[in-house]
Image (cartoon, helix red, strand yellow):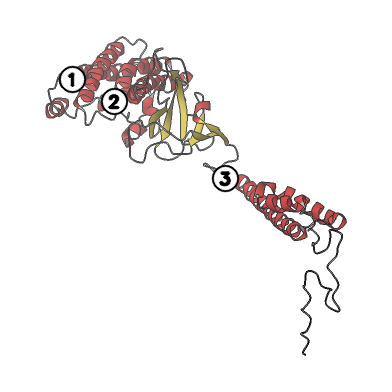
Amino acid sequence: MTVPPPPPSSPASGPPAPGLAPAVGPYGPGQPAPQPPLSGLAVASLVLSLLVCLAPLGLVLGIVALVRIPGNGKRGKGLAIAGTGVGGVVVVLTALLLVIGGARFTAWTEEGGGLLGSRDTKAGTLIHLKAGDCFAPAGGLFSAQEVEHERMTDTSVEIVPCDRPHPAQVYGTFRLKGDHAISDPATVSAQAFEGCVPLLHDFAPDTWALPDVGFSSYYPESVSGTGGDRTVRCWLGAEAGLPEVSLRQDPGAWDAGQRAYLKAMRPSSEAWFSASGKVDTDLAAATAWAGRMAEGGAESAKLLRAVDGLPERARGPVIALANRLDALSGIQRSAARAPDRAEFDERWGDEDASGEEWEARLALGLPVEEEEEGGGEPQG
């Protein structure tokens, strides 16, 4: 009889195979040892090093993590190395850029950088300008589209000593009238324009003697009923070349006859400068300006005839100018009543008093060269 072989031993209950020992450890038979914890310093080092502004802190934390990991047995040495490397590179590059940028800034200022190429300039804004200040606006004086009296949106300026080349000078400031809210930009602009004209003649009574300039202003876009900035700043801007002196005129430089003449001509000159950019296209603006010209001319004619103390050589030319202004006032009054643009242009014609004014100024000893070249003619 054949005896069957005994059944194989069960792996779970039989003896272990020869040469193999059971997996036994401190956590029990068959259980692997847990991994050591991850170093928080190493993780923080890498994360912070990737943030440029915090890279120096990431560099420091990475170094600390590398020193502590061998002693505490934590994981994360690779992260600490990466954090240290990235943080170090960022810190070095940042320092290099600062050195290069500082050197360029120093050279820019020493060689005369900025809008005007002068170390005497200082940064500011339009709202800090006072009457008499000379400056250069960052955005330019006048609109490239030649929009009349466009409000500047870039208020950055460089304030310049007036004995250095400068493109503009503030000739006066004033506050918008009324306590009510002003939200219409056109209304604010009109107030700004009208308020600047008399200030121009306070600053420079002899407008004929000014170089080739235009005038503009900066004003609030709107004004609330509860307050806010209401200040308008009026300035002259060079249209050709850069003045190297203040354009403010000293009445003490004129004799009594010259001062009396300029005072008498002020109503006519203010009327001329009150012309807005709409005069050439808008009938209402043109007729209103014609009316102001008629009143201003008549007032100047009256004052010229009343001037005392004129030198004998100037009396005749001054009276001739007064007569001419009276005649022009009649023409201007007629134009102010024109029903349409064609009729306005026909009534207005091309007559003026520049010839008589030139003769009167010459007799009084006032400068006339700019008028001969067409540079000192009043601008509307």
Q: Quadrant of residue 21?
A: bottom right
Q: Using the numbered discs, state the Cα–Cα distance from disc 3 to disc 1 in whole angstroms.
A: 52 Å
Identify residue type, mark 3: Gly
Say whether residue 97 is visible: yes
Q: Which mark is residue 275?
A: 2
- Where is residue 204 shown, x and y percent of the image? 42, 23
Identify residue type, mark 1: Ala
- Asked which secondary structure carries label 2, the reply is loop
Q: Using the numbered discs, state the Cα–Cα distance from disc 2 to disc 3 in whole angstroms.
A: 38 Å
Question: How many numbered discs sit on the rendered protein?
Answer: 3
User: Who comes first in sequence, dot 2 or dot 3?
Assistant: 3
Instruction: Please say if 298 is above or below 106.
Output: above
Q: Which mark is residue 195?
A: none
The residue at which mark 3 appears reads as 113
Image-based side of 347 in relation to 70, left or right: left
Image-based side of 379 in relation to 32, left or right: left
Q: Seen from this angle, which residue lies furthest bottom? A: 1
The residue at which mark 1 appears reads as 336
Residue at 19%, 27% (x, y): give it: 351
Identify residue type, mark 2: Ala
Question: For the C terminus, which image quadrant?
Answer: top left
Residue at 17%, 26% (x, y): give it: 348
Question: For the N terminus, which image quadrant?
Answer: bottom right
Q: Disc 3 vs disc 1: Cβ atoms closer than 8 Å?
A: no
- Asked which secondary structure carries label 3, the reply is loop
